[in-house]
Image: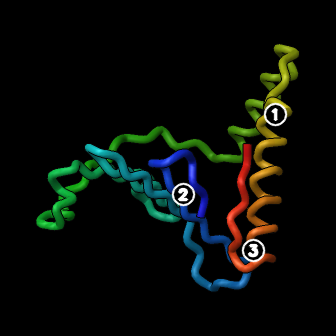
Amino acid sequence: NLEYGENILFNLKVSWIDPVRIRSLTVVGNKKMVVFDDVSTDKITVYNKHDLIYQNMSIPKLPYLNLKEPLAEVFSRFMSSIESRQQPISASDMINTIVILEAAEYSLKHSGKKVQLK
């Protein structure tokens, strides 16, 4: 579990041995909930708050997505960065990702101990 401030919680489950491949992300806000499911044909589903009273979860809104193959998109961005002579990803973004992964590993090795990041 990751906490950002007082009001943002993030639950992450990662498993190399779990036979069920789930690639989803759910973001819950005050007015809507968005579910991204990478293995579904409907990648993004948006629910309105009034639908979340559990009376009618069967009326989601499915926005149109112009889907591109992820590896091709990464390659395209990489080539654009070479042509424009700009750095594709900032070093600070990469460092922040590594810091979070290391903290998660430390927490896992210490029975779920909370790790404070600055």
Q: Which residue is mark 3?
A: 108
Q: Position of residue 84 (x, y in %)?
A: 82, 14
Q: Secondary structure at mark 3?
A: helix
The circle on residue 92 is 1
Q: Position of residue 95 (x, y in %)?
A: 84, 42
How many tags in the picture?
A: 3
Quarter containing the N terminus: bottom right
Q: Position of residue 16 (x, y in %)?
A: 73, 78
Q: Is residue 107 left or right of residue 95?
A: left
Who's the residue at 55% across and 71% down the image? 22
The picture quadrant where one finds residue 80 is top right
Left or right, 33 with respect to 110, comes to left
Image spot of residue 89 (x, y percent): 79, 32
Q: Amino acid at mark 2?
A: Phe
Q: CA distance from mark 3 to mark 2?
A: 16 Å
Q: Amino acid at mark 3?
A: Leu
